Image (tube, rainbow, N blue to C red):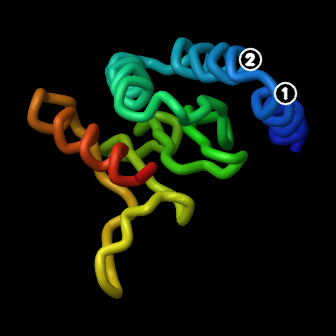
Amino acid sequence: MKARAKELKAEARANQDKAAGESDVLAAIAAMLEPDRTMAQRLHALIKASAPNLWPKTWYGMPAYARDGKVVCFFQSAQKFNARYATLGFNDAANLDEGAMWPTSYALKELTAAEEEKISALVKKAVS
């Protein structure tokens, strides 16, 4: 509860100041173990390049990217959740609708140029 309260204060600060949100995200990434740290660093750069209007912030201790205060996409490390893969997820603020059903999260084992291209296209579509 204390960690979430601290994060809510940081989130309020991040909603006011993009640089503060960036600092919080970079600190969350730096605290990750490998290989999640490298993957999160690459995703951070990719999301910033694909959608520079998104504001970085932490969300439940993980890197997230928001528009108008609502999280559009986020990264979950495999190690934090003791999972066999990391996750790139999209919330309902993302414009990814395709008919009556579409994916909102993606398992990530590694990032190659092909995955980075797909992620870039998804992020661009999410903010369109």
Three-letter code, disc 2: Ala
Between the C-alphas of marks 2 and 1, the distance is: 7 Å
Give residue 95's quadrant in the image.
Answer: bottom left
**Badge 2 or badge 1: first in the primary sequence:** 1
Q: Residues within 10 Å of mark 1 (few under 14, many from 20)?
A: some
Q: Which residue is tagged 2?
A: 20
Q: Residue furthest left?
A: 114
Q: Which residue is tagged 1?
A: 13
Three-letter code, disc 1: Arg
Give residue 114's quadrant in the image.
Answer: top left
Q: Is residue 32 left or right of residue 9?
A: left
The residue tagged with tag 2: helix, strand or loop? helix
Task: Report the quarter where the N terminus lies.
Answer: top right
Tell me, yes or no, whether the two marked residues, 2 and 1, touch with CB atoms within 8 Å.
Answer: yes
Total labels drawn: 2
The residue tagged with tag 1: helix, strand or loop? helix
The residue at the point 39 percent across, 46 percent down is 88
Q: Nearer the viewer, residue 88 or 77?
A: 88
x and y percent of residue 21 in the render?
69, 23
x and y percent of residue 60 in the render?
67, 42
Q: Nearer the viewer, residue 67 or 22?
A: 67
Q: Is residue 14 left or right of residue 108?
A: right
Residue 24 - label: none
